[in-house]
Amino acid sequence: MSSTSSATSPARSSSNPPAGAKKVRTRIAPSPTGDPHMGTAYIALFNMVYAHSQGGEFLVRIEDTDQARSTPESEATILDALRWLNIEWTEGPDVGGPHGPYRQSERQDIYRGYADQLVSQGDAFPCFCSNERLDEMRATQRAEGKTTRYDGLCQSIAPAEAAKQIAAGDAHVIRLVVPVDGTFSFEDALRGTIEIPWQQVDMQILLKSDGMPTYHLAVVVDDHLMEISHVMRGEEWINSVPKHARLYDALGWEMPIHAHLPLLRNPDSSKLSKRKNPTSVTYYRDMGYLPEAVANYLGRMGWSMPDEREIFSLPEMQDAFSLERISLGGPVFDIDKLNWLNGEYLRALSEDEFAERAIAWFTQGNRLRALVPLIHQRTNRFADIAPQVDYLVGDRADLTADDFDHKRVASDQARQILDHALRSFDESRGWERDGIFAICTTLAEGLELKLKDFLGPLFVAIGGKAVTLPLFDSMALLGADVTRMRLRSALEALGGVSKKETKRFEKSWRALIARSEAEIVTVDKEDSGS
């Protein structure tokens, strides 16, 4: 393969496809491994608006090759969140279409066929290296100041010998052959010419030892078979383009036009992350933001209307949209600005519309019905309901360090408790009462605290007071997003966590979790009699 490759669109050219060009088709391909991220919604919005502005089509594909972390619940939540924002698609796992299936886990045989083709052509090869050898290789490369990349050892194995090892059941992966010298070049529709030395490109694993594809093989195969014309994704994928271009070239396919959008940023210019801001779409839905306001705000992220107005609908954005108006500066996701914009939308409603939307928010997901088991036996008058549930149906009061003074644990330990709880909740895949209870019990035992003492700071963080309705039920009802946000703001009220303390807390938490997991394994062995 040549050491250079280019897409078919010149940099920053008109976003209108030339006469006779194939239909514009874009996609979003989320991984169902967690909450629906605002960054995913932002990329989905721009893909949908661009496709519709060109009379094209937008589809959804689920990248669930990480079977250990992917869940149907996460997939459903992501699709619901996109629909809440009025993002619509014509093909996808829920609506079907002529290019299905739309879940990568259901396309395994397709990927295997192309992996075999690449191996037979000499564009890929089986790799039998152990994890221990790879770790040692990377450690040596780092010590020598080199880019960590596979050294090509198994590429020299003769095809007949490799076939014997595979037949014998030797564990292996399939890796991509890449040039060792020269520079890869392509034209990004937003950024112009981008050059990446091949020395910086790894011999990417295409097919894992369990037979599942990696993102890099699956995305190329799927984008080609689903006739994607424009790949619009986050800038963090720029360094993957050489690998993908190498695959397109080896398979004899035309590479789609690529446009890498700027990443959403926190106000301090760091990448938008849940450790600094709520990043889940469901958080904003549950906190009473209007979907049209959130979509409007995402539309402002790195793009502007020709007349520079800040408030516009999705149809208005679609009518005015062009790639040329996308700014490559990191768009800042500012919650205060979103609050202002949402307020403008609320004030523009008529009083009847306001009442209808407010009632719909109060009752969404049977929210009020879910409160009944918590308050039924604690209520003498209906007038008693509001003081009991204020922190569950609205935001809780702002906290200060004084709110934690009367607890049985000191301020430093309160911060450790909140930090460890937050880390465990971030890692938790489910969100229900018993699971929350199990996490807190494990952490309390690991910190050698009585459960009631461990829970003291959590009561304040969640409800803003020392006594609330049952804590675990409250957290389950609030949801993971709101719970985590309240823990973060409680940490800030206690003075935050320094960088040095963050490292200490992380080390402590990891040791605690490892010890807990080891104890579980020991118990399982004892129960099985082994």
Image (cartoon, grey):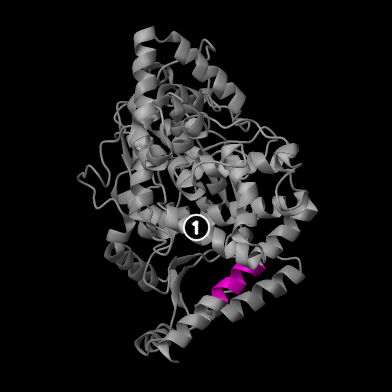
Q: Is residue 393 above or below residue 122?
A: above
Q: Is residue 395 above or below residue 468?
A: above
Callout 1: helix, strand or loop?
Answer: helix
* Residue 519, position as x, y percentages in the image: 55, 77
Q: Name the residue tied to disc 1.
A: 437
Q: Quadrant of residue 16?
A: top left
Q: Is residue 227 visible?
A: yes
* Residue 444, position as x, y percentages in the image: 61, 62
The disc labelled 1 sits on which kind of residue?
A: Phe
User: Which residue is pictured at 49% across the width and 37% down the height?
Assistant: 38
Query: Badge 1: few (under 14), some or many (20 or more) residues near its Cα, within 10 Å?
Result: some
Query: Main SS type for the magenta part?
Result: helix
Q: Is residue 205 above or below residue 91?
A: below
Residue 458 shown left or right of residue 175 in the figure = right
Q: Is residue 147 visible?
A: no
Residue 255 shown left or right of residue 518 in the figure = left
User: Which residue is pictured at 49% across the width and 46% down the height?
Assistant: 470
Residue toward you, 402 or 317: 402
* Residue 66, position as x, y percentages in the image: 42, 61
* Residue extending furthest toward the front: 380
* Residue 152, position as x, y percentages in the image: 56, 75
- Residues rendered magenta in the picture: 511-518
Q: Is residue 512 magenta?
A: yes
